[in-house]
Image (cartoon, rainbow, N blue to C red):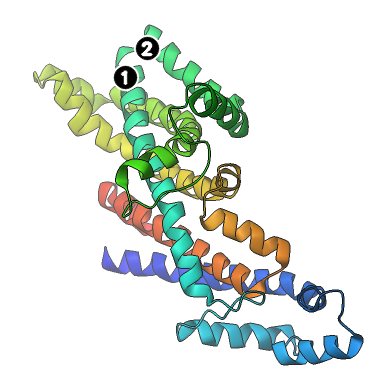
Amino acid sequence: MISYALRRLGAGIVLALLVTLITFFLLSGSLESVARERLGATGTPESLKALMTELGFDRPAIVQYLDWLGSVLTGDFGTSLFTSQPVAPAVAARLGVTLSLVVTALIITVIVSVALGVWAATRGGLADKVSQGLSLIGYVVPGLLIAIVLVAVLAVNLKLLPATGFTPFAQNPGKWATSITIPVIVLVIGGVASMAAQIRGSMIGELRKDYVRTLRTRGVPTRSIVLRHALRNAASPALTVLSLEFIQMLGGALIIENVFALPGFGAYAFNASLQGDIPIIMGITLFSVMLVVMVNLITDVVNGWLNPKARIY
């Protein structure tokens, strides 16, 4: 298992290097525009050339990338071109906001999806139709539309929840919960739509297998068969969907955080992209890729534990 995890981690590191390298080369074409943006309207060709030299933008892109990578390996992610704020602590602080949103949504998604998927697979009939109907609604209705409706109903009309803003958990857990409730609901609806359908399909397949019939003939209680045997075997494909759902929620945070004025990872990335703040964009890219790598690594390890045959890949 350890060698399997190390292989997956090595592949993740290679992926991180490739993504950051491609991102940097894509950004390198806009270096002069970024320097002009920093100088402002009063910049002259001479001052532009001097700034390009000062920032190292006049060097080959591969040299700049290797310098950035070397600094990252020492823990230095650079500083913002426009605020001179160190990138690592700035990104880490905002990452906490995003993770509190995404992890909460993911936990609720798992609970609801498992309950809905198992209910549909074991009951069938009306329960199955209701489950598929709810999944279809989650697929068809855009998340932005759901967000607008929830804000109009819960925040504007009923005044039960705030429409925008964020309160840190350490400052006030109650206000933190209310500040992320609507964004979490939006993410959960989309997550349940795909994950509940996956669990339902996997559970139906497991419940039709021979070992389930054998357990029934031996008098094993239905609850034990469903929860201890079928659900565990159905968990492997569901875990893959869960890892993909995490990545999708992380991407969805870009829109959600701007809609609800949350000071998170996505909003910070959006503003940095508008300015062309390359050190921040690179820091956000690296943090994002490493998050995805860690989630995929955990998923692969758990899958390898549940299904030893998966370890050969």
Please state, as top left, top right, bottom left or bottom right, where the C terminus lies in the image.
bottom left
- Mark 2: which secondary structure? helix
Callout 2 amino acid: Ala
User: What residue does disc 1 label?
Assistant: 119
Of residue 139 and residue 53, the one placed in the foreground of this image is 53
Callout 1 amino acid: Trp
Sooner in the amino-acid sequence: mark 2 or mark 1:
1
Of residue 191 and residue 124, the one placed in the foreground of this image is 191
Q: Residues within 10 Å of mark 1 (few under 14, many from 20)?
A: some
Q: Which label was assigned to residue 127?
A: 2
How many discs appear? 2
Q: Residue at x 36, y 25 (%)?
A: 117
Q: CA distance from mark 2 to mark 1?
A: 7 Å
Tag 2 and tag 1, C-beta contact below 8 Å: yes
Please state, as top left, top right, bottom left or bottom right, where the N terminus lies in the image.
bottom left
Q: Is residue 220 above or below residue 162?
A: above
